[in-house]
Image (cartoon, rainbow, N blue to C red):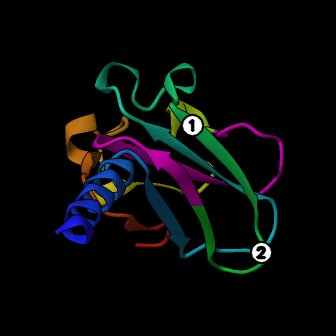
Amino acid sequence: MKFSRNAVFLLVLLNSTLAIAENLTVKVVGISKAVGNVHIALYNDSSHFPKREGMLEKAIVPVRNQTVTWVFRNLSEGHYAVATYHDANGDHEFNQGFLGLPLEDYGFSMDATGFLSAPDFSDAAFTISGLDRTIIIDLDP
């Protein structure tokens, strides 16, 4: 009986620890050239998506081939969205041309798209709850 009580306590403790420590793996595929960096931004607030000032976390990953991977660690359960772009020229800016048309490849979680602007947070959002999660963003759909 004593062993069972300890085992139950351990399971409850482990479960409560795991519930607040999920990891999100972001795999960016379809990178056109193995140069520059891929900027990956994680958001959890619709009012800040996809603004530079509103990022929950960000990563700048050097490009070595047509795929990069980054892991955001120890995330709480909740709704998140990811925005990413390939900074091929390495200037750390999302370059745009005439009328604000993008000059660099970009993508959003859940394959979300917008018309002449970024998609809404709700279109790019996904849930993290209880388990690690992997998403794939294709820059060459």
Looking at the rendering, the stretch of residues picked out in magenta corresponds to 71-95
Answer with the quarter of the image where residue 131 lies: bottom left
Q: Which residue lies furthest to the bottom in this view?
A: 65
Q: Position of residue 62 (x, y in %)?
A: 79, 62
Name the residue carrying label 1: 57
In this rendered view, identify the residue nearer to me: 124 or 5: 5
In this rendered view, identify the residue nearer to me: 116 or 118: 118
Answer whether labels 1 and 2 touch (C-beta < 8 Å): no
Q: Distance between the residues labelled 1 and 2?
A: 24 Å
Q: Going 29% across and 61% down the picture, which residue do you hit? A: 6
Q: Is residue 130 left or right of residue 25?
A: left
Inspect the image, locate mark 2, and give the three-letter code of the amino acid beneath it: Ala
| Element assignment for label 2 | loop
Q: Where is residue 112 in the image (x, y as percent from the top left)?
A: 28, 53
- Assign the magenta stretch its main secondary structure: strand
Q: Earlier in the sequence, mark 1 or mark 2?
A: 2
Q: Going 58% across and 35% down the picture, which residue do you hit? A: 98
Q: In this view, does 11 lie to the left or right of 74?
A: left
> Where is 58 relative to 72, above or below?
above
